[in-house]
Image: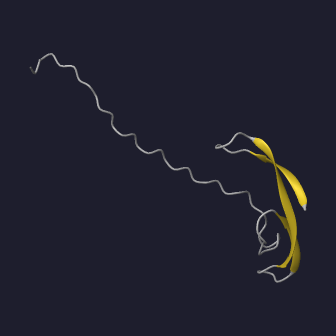
Amino acid sequence: MASKLISVREYTVRAHQREIHTRVFNFICKQCNETTNRETYGPRPLYCERCRPPQPPKRQQLKPAAKAKPRPMTYKSNTDLD
């Protein structure tokens, strides 16, 4: 099983090096119906690199920050209510 070192640069974790285990799959491409092989660390690919070249991982859409709830305020008055 082949291994690679990748650089992880995310906002949720500190940047670090991670070792991933890759595997070479031999399969028939769904689009061009040719026998091919492809190295990947995920599930078995369906398409060869010519039909579907590898793409960078998609970034998750950040949700807009929720509007802050109003805070109770204390007012000082010159008149006494007693």
Pick whichever, 51 or 40, lies toward us: 40
How many numbered marks does the figure carry? 0
Give me the residue at 61% from left, 54% from top: 60
Residue 30, x across and y down, in percent: 77, 81
Is 59 positioned to the left or the right of 71 in the image? right
How is the structure coloured here? secondary structure
Q: Residue furthest top?
A: 78
Residue 37 sits above or below residue 82 on the image: below
Q: Residue furthest right?
A: 2
Residue 73, x across and y down, in percent: 28, 28
Give me the residue at 64% from left, 44% from top: 12
Give me the residue at 44% from left, 45% from top: 66
Is 23 positioned to the left or the right of 71 in the image? right
Give me the residue at 77% from left, 75% from top: 46
Q: Residue furthest bottom?
A: 33
Would you identify the image quadrant in which residue 10 lies? Answer: top right
Is 75 positioned to the left or the right of 79 in the image? right
**Which image quarter is the C terminus in?**
top left
Would you identify the image quadrant in which residue 32 lies? Answer: bottom right
